[in-house]
Image: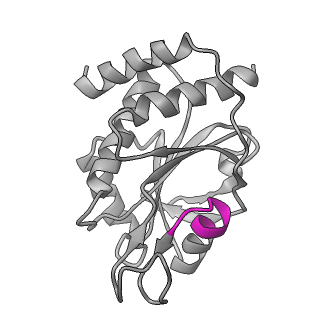
Amino acid sequence: MRPAVFIASLLLCLNACQRREPLPNFASVPPFALTAQDGRYVTDEDYQGRVWIADFVFTNCPGPCPMLTSHMRDVQDLLVERSLDVPLVSFSVDPETDTPEVLTEYGKTFGADFTRWAFLTGEKQKIYDLILHGFLLAVSDGAVSSEYSAGPGIITHSTRFALVDQNGEVRGYYHGEEPTVAAEIVADAERLLAKSR
């Protein structure tokens, strides 16, 4: 067992012992239609009735993306360990570079199980609209000056993970760079799953 997964399991057990408030509703994920790393057409309807976890990365990211993807791998491992059927979705914020083939290689590098973890690409404006207006998170390619823009051609994006419930509602945001993110988000995913049983 990877050390990060062991720590996450320990924290998950501690979290389970605490009484917690109901998870808030932050936003509704709008309809989307994108392409997965294997060329499959993926839509929001594929996740209807399911709890799922999303993050936002790009494959040639010089900043936090490798850490985010590594932590998503920890989430994957913890879900497997706990026998939880929760899909993972990584949306590319640089879809012009991140073709399905590029995303496949990227996912393999991080040990992604493609039966439970999809890497999605598509038309940039659609992805950016989804992130900005659906997930209510920041993203910019620097083409338009804004408070989120780091300059022309420089991609900036949120490092948060998002937990989405069975109705397409965002129920939690989590710091993707924190080593405890796997335990936190899996604990809350388990709470959402328990309510649907």
Between 157 and 101, the residue placed more toward the observer is 157
Relative horizontal placement of residue 15, taking residue 195 as reference (left or right): left
Looking at the rendering, in which quadrant would you find the C terminus? top right
Which span of residues is magenta-colored? 130-138
Examine the image and state in which quarter residue 181 appears.
top left
Q: Residue at x 56, y 80 (%)?
A: 125
Between 76 and 155, the residue placed more toward the observer is 155
Does the segment drawn in magenta span residue 72? no
Residue 19, percent across and down? Answer: 64, 15
Q: Is residue 34 above or below residue 141?
A: above
Residue 150, percent across and down? Answer: 36, 79
Does the segment drawn in magenta span residue 133? yes
Looking at the rendering, in which quadrant would you find the N terminus? top left
Between 87 and 2, the residue placed more toward the observer is 2
Residue 179, percent across and down? Answer: 32, 36
Relative horizontal placement of residue 78, taking residue 31 as reference (left or right): left
Q: Residue at x 26, y 68 (%)?
A: 60
Examine the image and state in which quarter residue 74 appears.
top left
Residue 81, percent across and down? Answer: 41, 19
